[in-house]
Amino acid sequence: MKRKGSKLVALTIFLSGLGAVGTVHADMDIMGGKATLSGESNVAVQQKYVNGSEQKFEEYRDVQNGVVLQDLRLRIDGNTIPYYLDLKVMHPALSDEFYRLQGGQYGKFGIELFYDSIPHNYATGTLILSGAGTDNLTIANQIQQDMQANELLTPARGTNPLAPNPQDAAQQAITTDLLANTNTTVFAFKREKAGFSVGYNFTDDIKSWARVTNEKKTGTRVITIGDYERYPQIPGGPHISDLFLVAGTELAEPIQYRTTVLNVGTGIYKKEWLADIQYTFTNFDNEDSTLRWDNPYRSTSISSSNFAGATNTSNGDFNRGRFTMGQLDLVPSSQSHDITLSGSVELPAIHGRFTGTVSYGMVFQNDSFLPYTLNAAVSGTNVPAFAGPANITDPATVLATSGHSSLNGDVRTITQSYVFTCKPVEPLTVTAKYRYYDYDNLSDAITFPGYAAFSESFWRTGNNDPRATANAGAPSSPLSYTRQNAGLVVDYHLFKPLTVTVEGGWEGWDRENLRINSTDELGIGGGFLYKPIKAVIFSGRYRYAHRTVNGYEPGNTAENPEAVGQVNFDWADRIRHRVDARLAILPVQSVTIGVTWQYLKDDYGGNNPFGLKSSESLAGAIDVAYRPSDIVTLYASYVQEYSKGAMQSAAKDNAVAGQNYFPRNFWNSDIYDKAETVGTGVTVQVIPGKLTLNTSYNLSFTKTEFSNTNPNLASDTLQNAIAQAWPPIRNRYQEVRVDIGYNLTKKLKVGVAYLYEWYKLDDFVNTPAYMAGLSAENSTKFVFTGANQYSYEANVAGAYVSYTF
């Protein structure tokens, strides 16, 4: 990010001066002795050197060269008056700046104002379209014409898209030249949040509050659009082997979000009981509701078509994505209202307490529908005969054919949460919990006449919805659900060193307008807390849960067009085992050792042949701290995490009547993730009370490996279903920090600091900006931005002055 120049320097000097002024009066009362001023100021001079991706190094921060006010704290406390004022400032005028002002009268009222800014830098890339950050991405008409002049439609390619052609080379040359001569774009956004709150106590028991916050997000991030054409290599026969022509581009999505939240409430807080009520209004506004972009490869639009020499004979299989301008509806603006009642009451007779919360919410959005497509050449079966001046590219057409100009989004939510705890006898504690959440989607259910498919190139009717018959339109499906959780925990103190726990729970989901009715999950478990001696604490917990599915529609039907046996993992039967353990040891007064361990195993879907079948994770950590003397402290930690996911899949072969999947299509994929993190550090009072050395080192290493196999005989496997070997993904990070500080006085400290970071990413998905000729598929028309998270090596050195007063 750019340095903010004189603004930064001026503000830093000004705020540093405030700190200096504070130091002048540090040992003196102010306001004639009615109040005391205290605080702290830290000013640094630093220099950074980054080799590689500076955006990755500063992903969530802003490290600038020169004079930087790290933080400033000023506080005024009344001595003879009941008032206070507290100011905190961090990194003023930088992208990660923070300001907070608090004040008020003790026991009566309080106010707070704050501003917080956090950057999120992605990477630098090359976008061949102009207008990044806006809702309209464009490219010169001449470029579109030159691209289209060198484009090969399906008939010219024949059945083999890999056949070399001079026009491919010409089109690649134009794209390569564009990338080489286009300025780079930084893909990033910044979150800025500001707020004001006030609290007022009418009495010691009756309190009220009001808060207003405003959060703004501005910037751009990368999104991708694309399509493909499938060329079977045995026309008229089964899909033994296919070739693909992919087309697409990466776009810059504009981020122009503003969220305003108002919260007001009041409550009564007694020793034996309490109750409060609060109202929250949230307004979310997206300044850019639509993104439109020019297709770099077309100056005129055509419709996709069928190629008679191919196996796939359904309309629209080929020449897809031949629109001139594309469109995408972005996150809609919305408003929500929530009212919440909370209360709690003591139950002295049984040494218990009951707490409950009930909330009702409403969310509305009325974002206008976009036209069906901007491609006026779209054709196909049953394209509506739009009456009057309306056509497929006119937003009024949606209203004319569906009777709706927007979704009329309306969602109502009800949340209830209750907790009851009691101790009927001294060694026994019982806790019961219940939570209810109802998501009721009252949005309009709309049947559209169809939609523009295949990258806005062909009109398609029907969307495999059970309420739709052939060519009878594409209904929308407002989804609703209810979720309930109930649990019971019993703790029993068996004898002095041992407490045991037994627990049980239930979770149930009821869903509407999905191909599943409900799920029920029952769980049971137990644990213990063991303290044999003062220096040892050992605890453990085990939980078993079994989820069952009710009313899941079978596959290969109108209700469920997926394959038979394919189930979404979060809707599938599941058996879960979870174990947690922790051990804390203090063998001697100067040593502390902590060990944690966790194991989680999920099995999904029972005998279903497709989808995520299992997920297994294991994590362990050890922390050691050693303080051999008052002047030396050493600490170290080690964390290892391991996980494995097993998935079963198959390639589709729609040439086999009545069977989309059969054994020779099957392939399995096991994904292994391993992460190791080592940390160590030492603090040394080189000169006790004067010179202090703090240093730390952290190293992390992650690796993802893939094992892809065909479970059946290789000789019986389709060529386009042969499991491929994927290279591993490696991620390494090192950090070294050194801080040497010298106390000139009890309140004035000077020092030097150094930070070294090294980040290395090896990832096969870090694609180049242009993929033409890099794979067997003729990917002549897929243009990336190259905005990947690259590696970096960074050094930051500086000196600082800190004063406490």
Image (cartoon, rainbow, N blue to C red):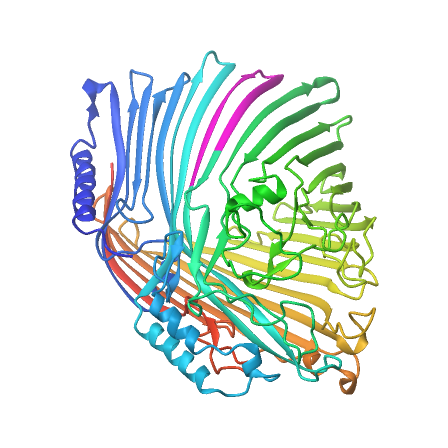
Which residues are the magenta region? 258-282
Q: Nearer the viewer, residue 89 or 253?
A: 253
Name the residue at 71% across, 42% down.
497
Q: Is residue 278 magenta?
A: yes
Image: 291 above or below 782: above
x and y percent of residue 323 in the render?
A: 49, 63
Q: Nearer the viewer, residue 336 or 198?
A: 336
Residue in the image at 59% along x and 77% along y: 244
Q: Position of residue 48 (x, y in %)?
A: 27, 62
Residue 228 placed where, x, y %?
Answer: 58, 71
Q: Which quarter of the figure has residue 126?
A: bottom left
Residue 160 position, x and y percent, is 60, 84
Residue at the top extreme?
203
Helix, strand or loop: magenta stretch: strand
Q: Quadrant of the N terminus?
A: bottom left
Residue 769 in view of the camera: no
Q: Nearer the viewer, residue 169 or 761?
A: 169
- Asked if one can make out residue 619 in the rendered structure from this viewpoint, the answer is yes
Q: Is residue 531 left or right of residue 118?
A: right
Look at the image and tell me in which quarter the C terminus lies: top left
